[in-house]
Image (cartoon, rainbow, N blue to C red):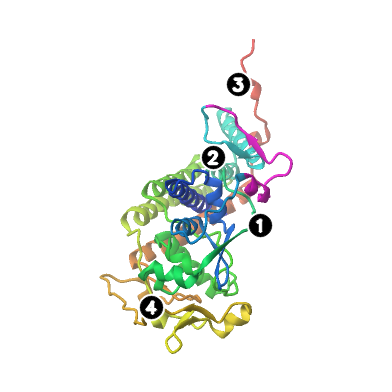
Amino acid sequence: MLGPEFIFMLALGQYVSARASVKAFHALEHKEWTMKHAFYADMGGIIFQPKEWNSFPINAAQLQYLVEKQYVDYPQIAKSEIDDKDKSDGLARFVEVNVSPPVVPLTYICFSRFITSMQMIWFTLNVVARASQKLAVTTIEITTVAYVFCTLGTLFCWRRKPMEVSTRVLLRSNYTIHQILRDGGRAASKPYVNTPLEFIDHKEWAATQLWKFNVNILRKFHVVRQRPLIRPAQRISSFNFPRLTQQAALGALLMALGYAAIFLAAWNLDFPSSAECLLWRICTAATVGLTFITGVVEIFLAPTKIDRDISDNCVEKEAPRRDINHGVLSTSAETSKTNPTMSSTLLPSFFKHQECQTQAKKGTSAKTFFRIPSKTITRFNIPLHSLLITELACAIYSVCRICILTEDLVGLRALPPSTFQNVDWAAYWPHI
């Protein structure tokens, strides 16, 4: 409710990740790998079963790595199989658009999404028509149009993404996780957070770091539920913001600015009081300004790559840890109780034990002042200026958004008479 533009940024990141996966598989001469396959894998639809170890979900980038290194065979998954697992529709699940060449890049459109999109477009046309015929438009209608704007962008990015896929494909390997990590080099030797293969594509950037930082704080105050700690993780988070390219980040910023600017359309509407009109103008102008400033700072000025410092004193008792005496990575007793089927010996140790050296960097990082309140094995270098700007902007932005949503409801108490008049659509049709 407070930030639909963030859902669009999530969808855009998933779309960019899926496109990169398709290009990577096509480079390996697997031309049958499509966007739908990539989305399916990134949703956790493929389970990797290494030899003599626990199974865990892998994403499209990790699958491409395993196929390229010949640890597994390329999975022959037909699009029809993914469609069968898709819970999106019943009778008319997909509508095929037979246009050659295609006018829009929609070969298959999920029927329910298509109908929903048409309803949203029709609502937007009604609001525009009301304004053109000098009929009163309410603030809640303006707000709805803004949500429609973001939702259409989100649906476009997810147009080939399956919905609620619950059936998974098991992919077995004749190689042990020991062999895979040994060949992975130095990057694979670091302790993992979710699964052992996250070293393949674990790329932190400002959005993921700040998201985790804030979510962990909410968990500390029991606002967000803490899931039972199971490693390797058995699901891929739906709120894992993939790293955006510079072009995609610019697109996300433009979408966010467009969303915030739509509220300015109510600048001269009839409000029940002058105070409410002033409050609306302040809040809408503030959201546009904050969106622009924060977007420019985080996307273009702040470093896009944030290094993670891993040290021995960061290793919590709940996380997989290196046992020097026995030379293994083991789990704590709490994790074993949570998941009795998990082996207490996770990985044979083939790396010499050495203390992680934390490289001091110029400037002050957020970890100097904050200990991330989460059961995790890592701490994150969040630049202090980035943290302060973002946290302050988010606080002001949230207050402004709450005021806007409150006015949408409170403003219904006093509506102009023309609010209850319908649009005269006949005025737009040519007639004699």
> Disc 2 to disc 4, how far (Cα)?
67 Å
Q: Is residue 98 rendered magenta in the image? A: yes
Please tell me which of labels 1 and 4 falls first in the chain: 1
> Disc 1 to disc 3, how far (Cα)?
50 Å
Question: Label 2: how many residues lie within 10 Å, few (<14), some (14-19) or many (20+)?
Answer: few
Please tell me which of labels 1 and 3 falls first in the chain: 1
Residue denoted by label 2: 269
424 or 278: nearer the viewer: 424
Question: In the current view of this chain or complex, which residue is farthest to the top?
Answer: 432
Q: Is residue 65 rendered magenta in the image? A: no
Residue denoted by label 4: 351
Question: Label 3: how many residues lie within 10 Å, few (<14), some (14-19) or many (20+)?
Answer: few
Quadrant of the snapshot with the N terminus:
bottom right
User: Which numbered disc covers residue 257?
Assistant: none
| Camera-side mark, 3 or 2 | 3
Q: Which residues are magenta?
A: 80-100
> Disc 1 to disc 4, how far (Cα)?
37 Å
6 or 115: nearer the viewer: 115
User: Which numbered disc covers residue 428?
Assistant: 3
**What kind of residue is marked 4?**
Phe
**What kind of residue is marked 1?**
Thr
Where residue 91 appears, x then y in whole percent? 74, 40
Residue denoted by label 1: 167
| 152 relative position to 80: left or right | left
